[in-house]
Image: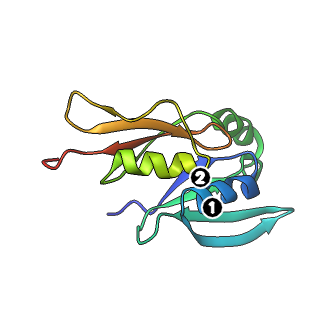
Amino acid sequence: MNIKSIPVFVSDQERALEFYRDKLGFEVMMDIPVTHGVRWLTVAPPDQPTEFILFPPAMAAGDESDDLRRRVGSWTGIVLTTDDCRGTYERLVEQGVKFAAEPRRQAWGGWMTEMSDPDNNRFQLVERPPNM
C-alpha cells in the first residue's frame, strides 16, 4: 500500500494554491471544477507521490462541513522532511513562509521547526540524522 493523498483543510483554495505552489514550490497535480467555485485541487512536492488535497469544508455535506471548518487552522500532524532544515528554512522565510521559530537540534539528533500556511495549518519541517 501507498499513501496517495492527505487532506489539508483550507478556507480559500486560491490563496492556499498560491502558498503551496508559489512559496513552497509544490506542483499542481489535479485542478478539477466541482461546483460553484469549489474544485478538486491537489498539490505535491516535485517528484513525490503523496499529494495534499486543498480541501474547503464547503465541499463536504451537512454536519461534516461544520466539523471540517473546525479543522482549518490547526496542527495537521504532517511532517515535511528535508536534507537541510536550516537551508530550507532560510529559503522559505525569504518566500514569506511563517515559522514558529528557527530550526533547533532535537534530542534524537535531527533538526526541526514548525511552519504554517495562510490558514494557520501547522506542519513540522524536519531533517533526520543520517542514521534514521
Residue positioned 41% across, 68% down in the render: 49
Comparing 19 with 6, the one in front is 19
Taking 35 as reference, is 100 above or below it? above
Secondary structure beneath disc 1? helix
First in residue order: circle 2 vs circle 1: 1
Count of numbered circles on the image = 2
Give the amino acid at mark 2.
Answer: Gln
Comparing 65 with 55, the one in front is 55
Q: What x and y, as percent, mark residue 78?
A: 44, 44
Q: Quadrant of residue 71?
A: top right
Comparing 104 with 14, the one in front is 104
Q: Residues within 10 Å of mark 2 (few under 14, many from 20)?
A: some
Residue 95: which numbered mark, if any? Answer: 2
Tell me the mark number nearer the camera, choosing from 2 and 1. 2
Taking 118 as reference, is 47 above or below it? below
* Direction from residue 52 to residue 32 in the image, left or right: right
| Label 2–label 1 contact, CB within 8 A | yes
Residue positioned 36% across, 37% down in the render: 112
Query: Most extreme residue toward the top, as rendered?
Result: 107
Q: What x and y, as percent, mark residue 105?
A: 28, 32
Residue under numbered circle 1: 22
Secondary structure beneath disc 2? loop
